[in-house]
Amino acid sequence: MSHDAAILDQTPKQSGWRIGAARHLFLVVELVALLIAGTVSWLIVRPGKSLLLPIAADVLIFVIVGVSRHWIRPMQGRRLNSRGSSWSIAAICIVSVFWTYFGVLAASVVFDSAAASAARHEVAISASGCQPVEHGSVGFINAPYVICTHVFSGASIVEFTKAPYVDGGYYYVTGQSKGSWDPDGCARHLFGNWWAYAIAVNSGCPLGYGMQGGG
């Protein structure tokens, strides 16, 4: 076999290896982008705050990933920019947005065992009132914060909030039918008895929260 023929015989193998390596590299990049987007959401999502900015940050991160893939494509061949790879970026972006919208606030109290203990303690007291807390945290609310317990007929709400009370906080709701305890407020159900609430403004509720209506 001539030297030129040997080179031609190796070229397809080398090209395939480069394309395979590039695809594996971008898979790693996508997973790292997913981790970064999830971390960014964890850092900026807070009870009472609109979810518009965290979701926009998720989308921006994956737009950057998609654009970078498009620009690198000519160096690795057209096969790198397959329709399947574009769908993979879109799918991971959707996963990230779902985590931001549905997961972060719920996880903030799921992972905080002290939050449930504090809420159950306040429910057991069965008396309305507020008290400051100088140590610890509940979800994303760090001390000093305030716990207020509101007792109604057959229901109670334990409210966790932090001064200056301009954004929102968490509710731990027991008893009364969901929605009837805060007819003029903005809230979203997290899981079980846990809700996040936001302060309603003239333009309505921030993204991710809805008016509770009356029952």
Image (tube, rainbow, N blue to C red):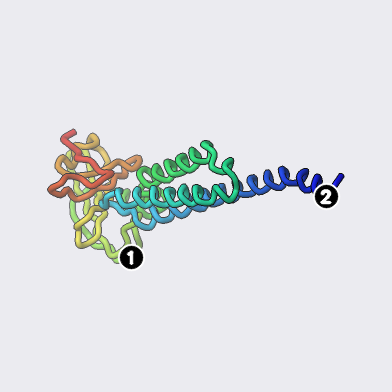
Q: Residue at x 37, y 52 (%)?
A: 57
Q: Earlier in the sequence, mark 2 or mark 1?
A: 2
Secondary element type, mark 2: helix
- Mark 2 = which residue? 3
- Mark 1 = which residue? 135
Secondary element type, mark 1: loop
Three-letter amino acid code of the residue under disc 2? His
182 and 48: which one is in front? 48
Please tell me how crowded label 1 is: few (under 14), some (14-19), or many (20+) other residues with Cα within 10 Å. Answer: few
78 to the left or right of 62: right
How far apart marks 2 and 1 lie (CA) works out to 76 Å
Q: Position of residue 48 (x, y in %)?
A: 25, 51
Q: Position of residue 132 (x, y in %)?
A: 24, 62
* Badge number at residue 72: none
Three-letter amino acid code of the residue under disc 1? His
Q: Residue at x 43, y 45 (%)?
A: 96
195 and 102: which one is in front? 102
Q: Residue at x 21, y 62 (%)?
A: 163
